[in-house]
Image (cartoon, rainbow, N blue to C red):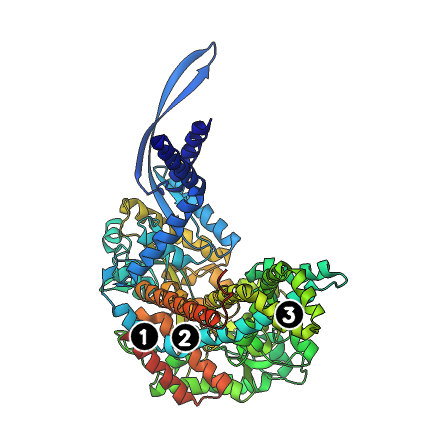
Amino acid sequence: MAASGNARKVSEAITGYLFISPWLILFTIFSLISLGYAVYLSFTSYNLLKPPQFIGLESYRRVLEEDLFLQKALPNTFKYVLIVVPIQTILSLVLAFAMDQKLRFRRFFRTIFYLPSVTSSVVISLIFIWIFAPQGIFNQIMGLSVNWLDDPRTAFYVIMGMNIFTTSGTLMLIFLAGLQDISPSIYEAAQIDGANGPQTFFYITIPMLRPVIFFVVTVGVIGCFQVFDQIFVMTAGGPLDSTTTITYLIYKWAFRDTTIKMGQASALAVILTLIILGVTILQRRIIEGSGSSAER
Amino acid sequence: MKSLFKLLSALLIVVFALTACGAPATPEKVVETVKETVTVKETQIVEVQVPAEKTVVRLSGWASSPSETALLESLLYKFSVENPDILVKYEPITGDYKQALLTSIAGGVEPDIYYVDIFWWLELATNDALLPLDDLMAASGVKKDEFIPALVEAFTYNGKLYGIAKDFNTLGMFYNKDLFDKAGLAYPTDDWTWTELKEAAAKLTDLSDPNKPVYGFCTPPDPGRFPAFVFQNGGTVMTPDFKDTTLDSEAAIGAAEFYTSFRAEKIGAMPSDLGEGWQGTLFGKGQCAMVYEGGWLIPYLRDQFPGTKYGVVMPPAGPKGEGNLIFTVAWGISANTKNPEAAWKVVQFLTSEASQKTVLESGFALPSRKSLQNSDYLKNNPNSAAIFNGSFNGAQPFFWGAVGSDVNDQMGKALERIFKENQPVADAMKQAAEAVRKALK
């Protein structure tokens, strides 16, 4: 009896693995192996033409001595995260809160706000290029003549604005789901106790949303650290490196330079992973420290 | 029932894994005997043996325009008629060509013949990815001096030739005839110097219409234009051994001062000032009266701005004479090819005088053979002739060694800093030189 039970367990496990195998195989080939290979490459010097040569931590040393990384990519990336994440989180929370009210045409608005998120980032980048062209519609409406994407002082902010515009819709949807998860009885209790609108929002809604906020901020931080396609399409890291981020620098070293620096690019990719890991752990600590509801 | 399902899923996965890991095709000599059965009257069956021994050669390049691709395909068809024993497979790469090529080399599945750009070919040669062509050339009696010397030199490394230029371009000074007429100026000639260029730019500039300002001479912060001025000022971008940069030399700084003075004096502009990414468009629109561009502008103007009347002369000489840039792409043969002779035959055919004449007459590019300098086509097309002859007048290859992309980046950024941040010219060039030196380490 016990033996047959065991066999049953094993066969169930096999069935289970069979079911997830399509994903598992793709994940192994395209993510896990590539990931491991990138870590290996980060300890080598590799130009694609000759086999990789092991050079230990040399690539890491080079990355950490590179001005383009220290003075441009690293600060730019942190600046991007620090500006985009708070704005998109607050904006999407406000949007979600508004969409949770019994407004007229609320379904219509929900669709409109979500639309940018389902549009290809390349398409939106192109639209923004035209909007912010010197003779573009933005300058025409505002009566300005700024060359937004060609000016080192403004280009990065245009990209930030675009990213906030595109991601807020998705985050709004997540917040909306969180909001609708809060039991109406809690609000009723608060009402009976005489709490007004703002009080309910700050003392009921926000604390109840804490796990969702943690999720949104984490996803936002990780996404912002990896910003690439918009920059690739809109500015290619320029003007004057003002929009060069870590991921763009990885791409530049790995594919753009005359002498391909695959090792150095892989080293930077590993460093970026460590940065994201560190920031996420730190974030978890902070949010857990200020309340207990981060654990579900 | 359950086990049947399991079996099916397992099968599905095996099939999936097999299709996912199919080995990519590698070039090889295919020897096969094709048996054809022919049915003749009264069900009599006769067996005919057709020996078919074809050497397969894969050829790759980027696809810049449909008509250019069609031209190459027609040449390859001609080749296949003349050489029935060689089968050329044309595999154009769309998108990022260099990235695709390098990864195919890394994977050992690169084509036998491929385009190599002057800007990065040396990287392939020094890493033994390209085959030296000298022996193959000698064996088939093709001489180096049949080609334009600058183009042979451009693809030579350690005394060996690694590519036969398929075509080339230099910079010409395009000028808008209508704007010259309007300003009452005589058209430029090949004898112009910097002085005339500056004077004409001042007279051609007309900013009276704020919606359509006209600038005399457009100066993009483009590393593909600026070095011509450095050469004209007697300078260089790199030292001859490419171990150091000379961007902070007096000649280079002087050239940068001259180049940026047009915009500073409001008789020149960057294309982005006028809301365009490329000055070719502005030239077509009549907002840049004079621009330095290559032969590629000619078909563009023909298609997009057929009404623009223009001429082309060689770039005006600077204080130290003439200077120009050569942009060129060559046919290279992979060092790992299994059929070097067949591959060379293809390259030889594509760079033969007959093929090059077809290319020239199609108007897409200028051929690399010296003998075509006196062709009727160039006599009847002075604009193309100006670009062709530019290669004999102080032209140097658009190539800055192993850190070429850094050098280009830094030249572009130095000009941008001068234009956008008003950095003093000498400081900008010194900063660029320092950055290049750091990259060289």
Q: Is residue B235 visible?
A: no
How dense is the environment of label 1, judged by Cα within 10 Å: few (below 14), some, or many (20 and up)? some
Secondary structure of the residue carrying tag 2 is helix
State the residue in front, B274 or B330. B274
Q: Which label's residue is closer to the chain start, 3 or 1?
A: 1
In the rendering, at what x and y percent does residue B299 appear? 54, 62
Q: Are marks 3 and 1 in contact (CB under 8 Å)?
A: no
Mark pair 3, 2: CA separation: 30 Å
In this figure, which residue is indicated by the disc labeled 1? Answer: A64
Residue drawn 68% across the image and 82% down it: B209
Mark pair 1, 2: CA separation: 10 Å
Relative vertical location of residue B195 with respect to residue B375 in this rendering, above or below? below
In the rendering, at what x and y percent does residue B224 appear? 43, 72
Disc 3: host chain = A
Mark pair 3, 1: CA separation: 40 Å
Furthest-front residue in this view: A193
Q: Which label's residue is closer to the chain start, 3 or 2?
A: 2
Relative vertical location of residue B362 with respect to residue B213 in this rendering, above or below? above
How dense is the environment of label 3, judged by Cα within 10 Å: few (below 14), some, or many (20 and up)? some
Q: Which mark is residue A94?
A: 3
Secondary structure of the residue carrying tag 3 is helix
Mark 3 belongs to which amino acid? Val
In this figure, which residue is indicated by the disc labeled 2? Answer: A74
State the residue in front, B121 or A93. A93
**In which quadrant will I find the C terminus of chain B?**
bottom left
Q: Which label's residue is closer to the chain start, 1 or 2?
A: 1
The quarter of the picture where residue A187 lies is bottom right
Mark 2 belongs to which amino acid? Leu
Furthest-right residue in this view: A104
